[in-house]
Image: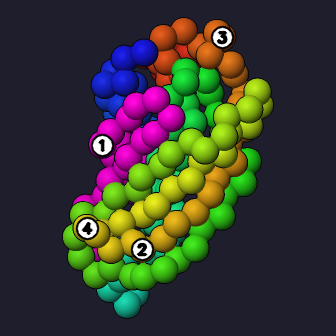
Amino acid sequence: MNFQAQMDFINTHNPYMQLSGIRVLDLGVDYAVTGLEMDAQSCNPFGSLHGGAIYTMADCASGCAARSNGAIYVTLNGSINYIRGAKEGAIRANAQVVHRGRTTCVVRVEVHCGETLLADGSFTMFCVRQPEECGEFSLTPDQNGSK
């Protein structure tokens, strides 16, 4: 599997991630890292990183980690614990698959600003298409209808 091609495709063909300023920074077997450079658009009215931005990063990282096997997954359930806020900096969500079944995948994720843990969570992803039905990787222009 070409993880760089998968990362490039996600970063250019996921409008919600683009709108949110989130990018896939690293991707491999059963793990993914997403990143966000904090700016005014990612903050709450108090100048801290918005909880929705943290959740979105965690969800995106979890989905990418689940899809690293070439299948297509959607979020079935997500739970996050907010631990600390951030006022500035580079935010990273590190996701790791902890269980992969036939139809579900459980992913643990931690969101950091530097060394500071901002949040941790768990996401259960549901497989809607198995790898053998997807070709080289799960998000290709031919499979999602875009060119």
Q: Marks 4 and 3: CB-CB under 8 Å?
A: no
Residue at the spot of label 3: 133
Mark 4 or mark 1, whichever is nearer to me: 4
User: Of helix, strand and loop, which one carries label 1?
Assistant: strand
Residue 137 is a magenta residue: no
Q: In which quadrant of the rendered view does residue 57 lie?
A: bottom left
Against 105, is 77 above or below? Answer: below
User: Tag on residue 114?
Assistant: 4
Q: Tag 2: residue type?
A: Leu
Mark 4 or mark 3, whichever is nearer to me: 4
Q: Is residue 44 visible?
A: no
Question: Percent position (x, y) of residue 132?
Answer: 64, 9
Residue at the spot of label 1: 25
Which quadrant, please, contains the N terminus?
top left
Question: Percent position (x, y) of residue 111?
Answer: 42, 63
Question: Percent position (x, y) of residue 74?
Answer: 66, 39
Q: Marks 4 and 1: CB-CB under 8 Å?
A: no
Residue drawn at (61%, 44%) of the image: 98
Q: Tag 1: residue type?
A: Leu
Q: N-terminal of the two: label 4 or label 1?
A: 1
In magenta, the rendered stretch is 15-41
Q: N-terminal of the two: label 3 or label 2?
A: 2
Residue 27 is a magenta residue: yes
Q: N-terminal of the two: label 4 or label 3?
A: 4
Which quadrant, please, contains the C terminus?
top left
